[in-house]
Image (tube, helix red, strand yellow):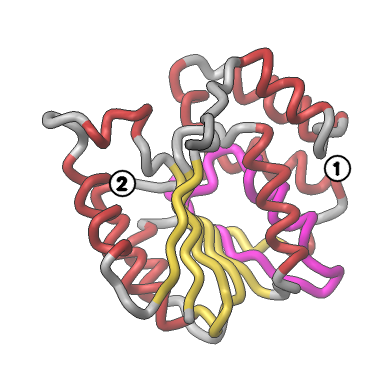
Amino acid sequence: MGHQVPVTEELHDYMVAHGMPLDEIATELRAETEKLGSPAGMLTTADQAGLLTTLTRLIGARRAVEIGTFTGFSALAISRGLPDDGELICLDVSDEWTSIGRRYWERAGVADKIDLRIGDAHDSAAKLDGEFDLAFVDADKDWYIKYFETVLPLIRPNGLMLFDNTLAGGRVIDADGPADRKEFNAHVAQDDRVDVIMLGIGDGLTLVRKK
């Protein structure tokens, strides 16, 4: 039987340092976000950022969409994996928080790849068109099934959808765990249009490959 290594904060830092460490721009963006206090809990982890960049490159993504941008850390990671003529559409309701990300996107030279659309993400997602290679969803969890059903038809075969926070701090296996995450996890697990793998990275990251 295999052994699961518990990832402490120190081990996480070691893994990032020996994998794809954050550069100065990404580090400063994280530091500024952490100054926001409790909202900083929505920040994507550093190891997830490296994975997002790598997966974007691995599948040769040229067009991606992100639902839930916050201060732009994950968008920075995805956009860095896109080619120079790639496009990342970011949907978020907050002009205040995303304005932080805009400054760092400019510094990183990826702002021209990012189309930020401020407004209700439910409405914005419904208005998406064309084909996408990759989607990253980190927004209101009770809408995960709706986002999945809305975006999946737009994903090309062998394209990827990624959903963050799907383990809810490990509480998904508790009897009183979050119903929204439980319902979403069960929904995608039984969908024969996709292959699904759940990773114990960050707060749980679900990778969904469209067949």
Query: Which mark is on residue 6?
Result: none
Q: Which residue is mark 2?
A: 141
Q: Residue furthest left?
A: 175
The front one of 69 and 8 is 8
Question: Which residue is located at x 46 percent, y 45 percent?
Answer: 164
The front one of 122 and 9 is 9
Q: As shown in the figure, which amino acid type bears the numbered disc 2?
A: Lys
Q: As shown in the figure, which amino acid type bears the numbered disc 1?
A: Arg
Classify residue 13 by image quadrant. top right
Neighbour class for label 2 at 10 Å: few (<14), some, many (≥20)?
A: some
Judged from the image, the secondary structure of the residue bearing numbered disc 1 is helix
Neighbour class for label 1 at 10 Å: few (<14), some, many (≥20)?
A: few
Give the x, y percent position of residue 173: 24, 34
67 left or right of 109 in image: left
102 left or right of 95 in image: right
Question: Which residue is located at x 66 percent, y 74 percent?
Answer: 63
Cα separation, mark 1 vs mark 2, equals 31 Å
156 versus 115 height, above or below: below
Magenta span of residues: 68-93
> Magenta stretch containing residue 83, yes or no?
yes
Give the x, y percent position of residue 6: 53, 21
17 versus 186 height, above or below: above
Circle count: 2
Give the x, y percent position of residue 132: 57, 77
Give the x, y percent position of residue 160: 55, 68
Query: Which mark is on residue 107?
Result: 1
